[in-house]
Image: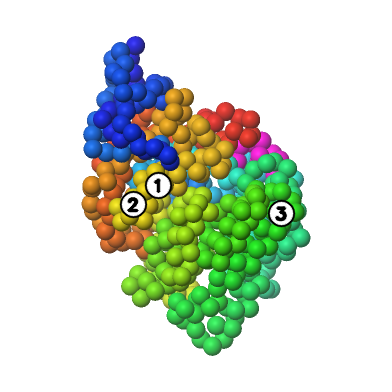
Amino acid sequence: MAWQQRIKNGTIVTGKDMYQADIYVQDGKIAAITTEDLPGEVIEEIDAGGKYIFSGFMDTHIHSRDPGPTHKEDFTHSTQAAAAGGLTTVFEMPNTNPPVNHADNFDRQHQHLGEQASVDFALWGICLGHLNEEHIPDLHDKGVIAFKFFWGYAVHEETFQLMYNYKPGMENVIPPFHDGEVYKMMENVARTGQVFAVHAENNDLIQTLTSRVEERGGSTYEDLLEGRPALAEVLTVQTGIEMARATGVRFHVLHVSAGESVRLIREAQREGLPVTVETCPHFLFLSAEDFDRVGPKMKVYPPVKHRSDQEAIWEGIADGTISHICSDHAPHTQEEKDGSLWSIPAGMCGVETLAPLVLNAVSEGRLTLQRAAQLLSENPAQLFGIAPQKGTMQAGSDADFTIVDMNKEGTIKQDELHSKSKVTAYDGFPIKGWPVQTIVRGQTVMKDGEIVSSGNGQIIYPTSTGRTIHGT
């Protein structure tokens, strides 16, 4: 017998344990985890001595802008960046052009991205209220990983593209959906049993407060926060929780940024409501107090808030309120990010720096290795229904591994990122603890920071759809 791969001498890390064993791989799957030498030839042997082996890290929230404004990013570059950062699976957001709003566009996106993928990927479906409510069952059957609603955003009535800076009276624009329409969306998604995830910002409040700031000529970062305060998120989270209580939908808050939101979600979870939440590195490692140092590169929506919010989010990480960490990777060009704080777009690179930032937090004593395994692998796989094929270290699971050297030190350098546009708020951040090898279904895609193969990324489906997890 010939084994496809054996990884030896490393320390395996799961959410509960750390132990030394060898991993045998056959046909892209974990065949055995053992301390014994199994008979047979080994085609590829990897010595992970002194390193840690995780079930492959994943990023559940990326915007590759493909198809769309691919001068900023495309799926070829984003998945290579993912692999360079130690990720084996990414979830692509649905607000592309065209969006993933019905079954035909799902199929087109599946084929389009599958031709470029260096890592495995899943596709989000978008909720556009009455514009696509009849397509929700078909999107579920096709295998979307979950459904996303951009709460508080307007939609162009012809292209279905989101309008990020909506003003009343815009032509050919459908204003942000009212709460009754959101309630109907939740009912429709609840029937599928899948996650209904929201970008949580209250448009009415933002419109009123931003106009007030603009009228007095506000231009600082504190002015931005005054126009887009924590309350805009908190009100939406509060409403969403109550609607989840009424509809039974699995309500998920994307990229939580406000401490009060975390407290509301914690209370909802203690009640037993189906409410979950994620956060991003910029809310853990940046605060408003960093703007003078970092500058406009850190502008994201919802915006990075104050240190008190950051501390409350860390509390949510510590007590398990927050299920996982993802990047909200949303690149813009350097030229687009150069300008006044109010005029530049929100978003930055993040897929390649996600895991190094989390691992550095381990080095600093803010997390354990086991908690990193939960936040970057196990919890998202369970939440979105792709375990045990993904995010699980056991025989029969996909042979996806992130091998980590916790002694490796270095610095995040913007110009060395693999994304097409490289703007990041983390340029110059010192890191101790780096992914040094990325393996997707038994194939090494990254080694020592270099992309060594284009990979053979495949689409994955949640088990709730009844489809096999991989598709071609």
- Who comes first in sequence, dot 2 or dot 3? 3
- Who comes first in sequence, dot 2 or dot 1? 2
**Is residue 297 in view?**
yes
Q: Is residue 372 above or below residue 6?
A: below
2 and 1 marks in contact (CB < 8 Å): yes
The circle on residue 245 is 3
Instruction: Name which residue lies at 51% across and 75% down.
Output: 225
Q: In this view, does 369 lie above or below 413?
A: above
Which type of secondary structure does the marked residue at label 3 adopt? helix
**Mark 1 sits on what residue?**
372
Name the amino acid, label 2: Val
Q: Nearer the viewer, residue 340 or 362?
A: 362
Instruction: Name which residue lies at 49% across and 84% down.
Output: 218
Of the 4 image quadrants, the one containing the N terminus is top left
* Label 2 CA crowd tier, 10 Å (few <14, some 14–19, many 20+): some
Name the amino acid, label 1: Ala
Q: Give the range drawn in magenta.
A: 135-144
